[in-house]
C-alpha cells in the first residue's frame, strides 16, 4: 500500500463539530480502507506521528470509521476504514481512544 495524504474520495473542509474535518467527495462503501492515519515508534522513541488523515478526522461517540493497528517489531501503523456506508458530503468520524492510551 503506497502512502497518499488523502484518498481521492476525501477532502478537508470546515466542520460543524470542531475546526476542520475529513469529508467524503463521493459515496464510500462499508469496509473501505481509507489509508494510514498514525505511526507509533515503539523501540527508540515513544513518539506518535499523524498523517493528514489522522490529524483532521474528528471524534464522535457514534463513529462511521474505525482505526486498526498493523504491528511489526519496530513500529505500529494505524489505518482507518469505514464501518458503514458514507454518503458524499458526509464528515468522517472516529471514536478517539488513541490519545488517552498513549500519553
Image: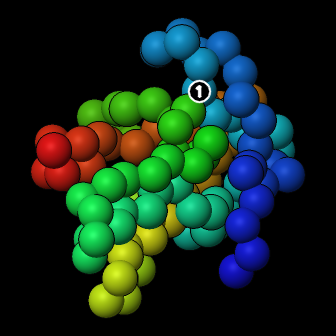
Helix, strand or loop at disc 1?
Answer: strand
Q: Can residue 80 be seen by looking at this rendering?
A: no
Q: Residue at x 71, y 21 (%)?
A: 13
* Residue that sits furthest to the bottom in the current view: 73
Q: 87 or 2: which is nearer to us? A: 2
Question: Which residue is at 31% across, 42% downward?
Answer: 95
84, 65: nearer the viewer? 65
Depicted 60 relative to depicted 27: above or below: above
Q: Is residue 47 above or below residue 59?
A: below
Residue 82, can we see it? yes
How far across and down, in percent of the image, does residue 53 sit? 60, 46
Position of 6 relative to 73 (above/below) = above
Q: How is the image coloured?
A: rainbow
Q: Is residue 72 above or below residue 100?
A: below
* 63 sits to left or right of 23: left
Extreme residue toward the front, this view: 44
Residue at horizontal 24%, vertical 59%? 46
Image location of residue 23, percent across then percent down: 68, 34
> What residue sits right under mark 1 in the picture?
21
| Quarter of the image that includes the N terminus | bottom right
- Please count the marks in the image: 1
Quadrant of residue 71 in the image? bottom left
Please state, as top left, top right, bottom left or bottom right, where the C terminus lies in the image.
top left
- Residue 57 x/y as whole percent: 52, 36
At 35% from the left and 82% from the top, the residue drawn is 74
Residue density around tag 1, few if under 14, some if 14–19, many if 20 or more, within 10 Å: many
The reply, left or right, for residue 23 in relation to residue 26 is left
Amino acid at each position: 500500500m503506497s502512502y497518499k495524504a488523502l484518498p481521492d474520495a476525501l477532502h478537508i473542509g470546515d466542520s460543524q463539530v470542531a475546526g476542520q474535518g475529513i469529508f467524503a467527495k463521493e459515496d464510500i462503501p462499508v469496509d473501505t480502507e481509507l489509508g494510514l492515519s498514525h505511526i507509533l515508534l515503539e523501540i527508540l522513541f515513544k513518539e506518535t506521528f499523524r498523517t493528514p488523515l489522522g490529524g483532521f478526522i474528528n471524534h464522535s461517540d457514534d463513529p462511521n470509521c474505525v482505526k486498526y493497528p498493523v504491528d511489526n517489531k519496530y513500529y505500529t501503523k494505524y489505518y482507518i476504514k469505514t464501518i458503514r456506508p458514507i454518503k458524499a458530503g458526509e464528515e468522517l468520524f472516529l471514536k478517539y481512544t488513541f490519545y488517552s492510551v498513549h500519553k
